[in-house]
Image: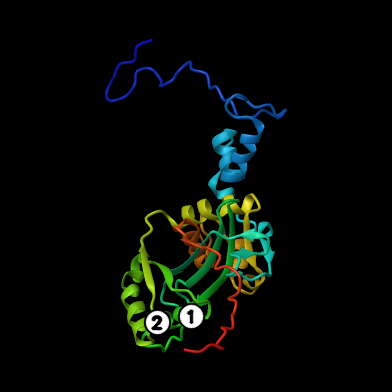
Amino acid sequence: MPMVYEKNAFSTPFLRGYKLLKIPIVNAAGTPAWPEVFPIARIDQLRETVGARHFSSQMMLECTPLERARLDPGGVKFYDAEFDTRTAHIGEFHITGMTLYWDPATGRRHRDGSACVLLYRDDKNRHIFIHDILYLTVSDDEMFPLSRQCDMVLDFMCARSLHRITLETNGLGIGVPEIMHDCATKRGANIYVNRIQNHKSKSDRILNAIEPALSTGRLHAHTRVQNTPLMAEMLGWSPIGAPGIHDDGLDAVAGAIADTPTPVRAIGTQIQTFTANTNFKI
């Protein structure tokens, strides 16, 4: 039946008489809908890549309401190995990239928190390692809270021989790169600051960056991260927000995951020393 406009409305209900056809990528018996395009191995790879929530909504056509989405800290795999610069390994994993990401804030009490996270990646196997996270707090009496935080971050970088950092410049962070450079110049440190602005909502950034790796067992954290507020943030987090719940560390981790990593390469074996034969005549 043709549809006509009548006072800016359809005279016939839109899609009246149509039937809904839903074909999930794999049925309840485990049979692929299109085995020639998506065999089981490919489907399993997709599930491991995008995570349970995205796979359910996009591939199985079963949407999970946003308010039910959670970040289960029980899915984090903890390790106690340090990064080996000679072999570019953390334990058995070969590291291909790293990111140092700082989401600055005032650092004062009862305000948005300031967090800096060091992240390593095994891009071949899509594993992510939260190796260290620094929560920056300053006294309410501090006259230059951002300068004080820059010094704390520079100490963090110096202790780990890091020279590159990504700074989120939304809001208060817009002037931090210049302060960071000034503080680095005073102490003779050579650093590179990458500036980045985020335009998506914080809840979308956190959920889309962390949940796929967490739900597929690819998110790791060093045991020292257990002594920070990050696990409590993860436990209490909800994409629709909750009063009194902080997510500053999660936001920094999400930014680090989304950031383009710095390539990491092994520096080789230890330097060998040789003794020259000086028993000769000129």
Residue 215 x/y as whole percent: 63, 50
Give residue 54's mark.
Answer: none
Q: Is residue 191 visible?
A: yes
Looking at the image, residue 211 lies above or below residue 224:
above
Indicate left or right for 135 with 218 as reference.
Answer: left
> In the rendered image, which residue does mark 1 sit on?
158
Rendered residue at 47%/52% (across/down): 204
Quick one: 186 or 243, which is closer to the camera? 186
Residue 228 x/y as whole percent: 60, 73
Q: Amino acid at mark 2?
A: Ala
Q: Secondary structure at mark 1?
A: helix
Tag 2: Cα neighbours inside 10 Å, few (<14), some, or many (≥20)?
some
Rendered residue at 68%/66% (across/down): 79
Instruction: Mark 2 or mark 1: name the one nearer the start of the chain.
Output: 1
Residue 168 x/y as whole percent: 39, 65
Q: Amino acid at mark 1?
A: Cys
Rendered residue at 63%/71% (across/down): 82
Tag 1: Cα neighbours inside 10 Å, few (<14), some, or many (≥20)?
few
Quick one: 43 or 203, which is closer to the camera? 43
Residue at mark 2 to residue at mark 1: CA–CA distance: 8 Å
Q: Secondary structure at mark 2?
A: loop
Looking at the image, residue 222 lies above or below residue 16:
below
Instruction: Answer whether labels 2 and 1 touch (C-beta < 8 Å).
Output: yes
- Residue that protrudes farthest toward the top in the picture: 1
Quick one: 1 or 185, which is closer to the camera? 185
Looking at the image, residue 235 lies above or below residue 38:
below
The image quarter in which residue 190 lies = bottom left
The image quarter in which residue 1 lies = top left
> In the rendered image, which residue does mark 2 sit on?
189
